[in-house]
């Protein structure tokens, strides 16, 4: 099996899982994966030396030795001038050249400042191309607008916008940015307009957590269980969600024009009026002066009040996490993920380690010998297969595939009597 069009980390994971099992010859595996035997020994040796599958991840290509690196005293001089003046690389370049006769390239100065953590704002990369989905409900953009202070409580508008038609499927007033407040609004939207294929969000606390490798929150897990693919924008790049960001500018203008509500209970009716006019009355220049309602239609995918249980492959060892997101195994408890509390997970035992996967994604590696666990940001192959695998493929013992970016399964697996169904 050649490397083309497959993430390198995915191939390493699959290769090493099979190589350490001792059931197949290394030479045969190398031929199957289309790699040389030295490369195969390299990946297996890296796993054995590291003692963890996380050692297979792509390493930095930065040289270990840099003979031409800027001398330390020059770096210190750059840092001192930066702290003294607060200037950027171009101005520091001129200062060093004119006052001290020390010509240091602008790019070198900027890299020094980056290494020392003295660049406060990352430069916004230009958008390489503008994207737009070809049909309604292929992608919704979701975001919250900056709060509006009120005497009795704050208002945090929550917006959900269809990427193709710019149709505002949801606009809600939240008194606080909490999952308990936001999730009922999403449920109401899904019941009214159906479920989209994917949702694009920033890294807000409602749907992005720093507490686990997959950045899962309870809310994002609920979206995954509805078969919604999760897409996250880059840090400090709001242009990724340009459509909903542009709507928020319109929303701010509308609120100023109509008048800021004097009381909290006036916000829902105000936002409902703005949503109605935006969808039905206001021409949109990006749509050729058409209204969003002319292009939008509800999703054929209905909201599942009780999501269908995930079907793991036959013969899988499946266990349920406790209320703290911990796995009980071998008479001990191991932390997996708080957001997956009481969820069913698949357990695979490889080379004395326990690999834990939830639905289509690996989430944790447990090493009982070292008494430690590690997050695994890896996605299972079943999530990307739109059709059921053949019986031959199921019986081949082929291990899962790895993906590094958080995303939900775009479609739930096709029902098949041969798979093991776990009732929640």
Image (spheres, rainbow, N blue to C red):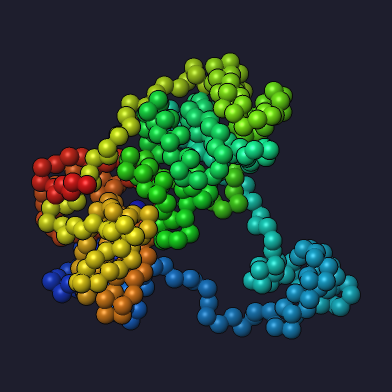
**In the drawing, does residue 406 fall left or right of residue 17?**
right
**In the drawing, does residue 140 fall left or right of residue 322?**
right
Q: Is residue 417 visible?
A: yes
Residue farthest right in this picture: 99
Residue at 33% from the left image edge and 39% from the top image edge? 226
Residue at 40% from the left image edge and 25% from the top image edge? 192
Q: Tally the marks.
A: 0
Q: Nearer the viewer, residue 301 or 287?
A: 301
Q: Quadrant of residue 154?
A: top right
Q: Nearer the viewer, residue 316 or 62?
A: 316
Quadrant into which the N terminus falls: bottom left
Q: Nearer the viewer, residue 305 or 175?
A: 175
Query: Vertically, is 402 above or below 147?
Result: below
Horizontal and vertical percent position of residue 128: 57, 44
**In the drawing, does residue 88 fall left or right of residue 112?**
right
Horizontal and vertical percent position of residue 252: 67, 32
Residue at 80% from the left image edge and 68% from the top image edge? 92
Residue farthest front in this picture: 152
Horizontal and vertical percent position of residue 178: 50, 45
Residue at 86% from the left image edge and 78% from the top image edge? 100
Q: Is residue 401 visible?
A: no
């Amino acid at each position: 099996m050649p490397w083309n069009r497959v993430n390198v980390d995915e191939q390493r994971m699959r290769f090493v899982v099979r190589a350490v099992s001792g059931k197949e010859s290394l030479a045969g595996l190398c031929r199957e994966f289309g790699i040389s035997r030295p490369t195969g020994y390299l990946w297996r040796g890296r796993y054995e030396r590291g003692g963890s599958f996380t050692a297979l991840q792509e390493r930095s290509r930065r040289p270990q030795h840099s003979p031409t690196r800027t001398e330390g005293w020059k770096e210190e001089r750059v840092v001192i001038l930066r702290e003294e003046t607060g200037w950027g690389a171009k101005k520091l370049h001129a200062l060093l050249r004119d006052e001290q006769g020390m010509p240091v390239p602008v790019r070198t100065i900027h890299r020094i400042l980056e290494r020392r953590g003295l660049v406060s704002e990352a430069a916004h990369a230009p958008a390489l191309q503008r994207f737009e989905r070809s049909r309604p409900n292929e992608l919704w953009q979701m975001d919250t607008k900056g709060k509006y202070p009120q005497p009795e409580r704050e208002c945090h508008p929550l917006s959900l916008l269809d990427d193709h038609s710019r149709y505002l499927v949801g606009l809600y007033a939240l008194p606080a940015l909490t999952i308990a407040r936001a999730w009922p609004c999403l449920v109401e939207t899904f019941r009214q307009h159906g479920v989209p294929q994917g949702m694009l969000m920033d890294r807000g606390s409602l749907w992005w957590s720093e507490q686990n490798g997959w950045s899962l929150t309870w809310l994002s897990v609920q979206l995954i269980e509805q078969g919604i693919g999760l897409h996250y924008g880059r840090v400090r790049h709001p242009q990724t969600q340009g459509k909903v960001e542009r709507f928020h500018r319109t929303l701010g203008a509308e609120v100023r024009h109509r008048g800021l509500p004097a009381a909290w209970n006036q916000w829902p009716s105000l936002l409902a009026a703005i949503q109605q006019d935006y969808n039905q009355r206001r021409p949109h220049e990006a749509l050729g002066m058409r209204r969003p309602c002319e292009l939008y239609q509800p999703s054929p995918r209905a909201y599942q009040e009780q999501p269908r249980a995930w079907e793991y492959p036959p013969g899988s060892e499946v266990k349920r996490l406790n209320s703290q997101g911990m796995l009980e195994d071998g008479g001990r408890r191991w932390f997996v993920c708080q957001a997956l509390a009481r969820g069913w997970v698949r357990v695979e035992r490889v080379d004395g380690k326990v690999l834990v996967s939830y639905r289509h994604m690996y989430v944790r590696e447990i090493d009982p010998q070292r008494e430690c666990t590690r997050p695994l940001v890896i996605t299972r192959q079943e999530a990307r297969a739109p059709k059921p695998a053949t019986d031959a493929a199921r019986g081949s013992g082929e291990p899962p595939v790895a993906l590094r970016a958080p995303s939900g399964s775009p479609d739930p697996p096709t029902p098949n009597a041969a798979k093991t169904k776990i009732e929640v």
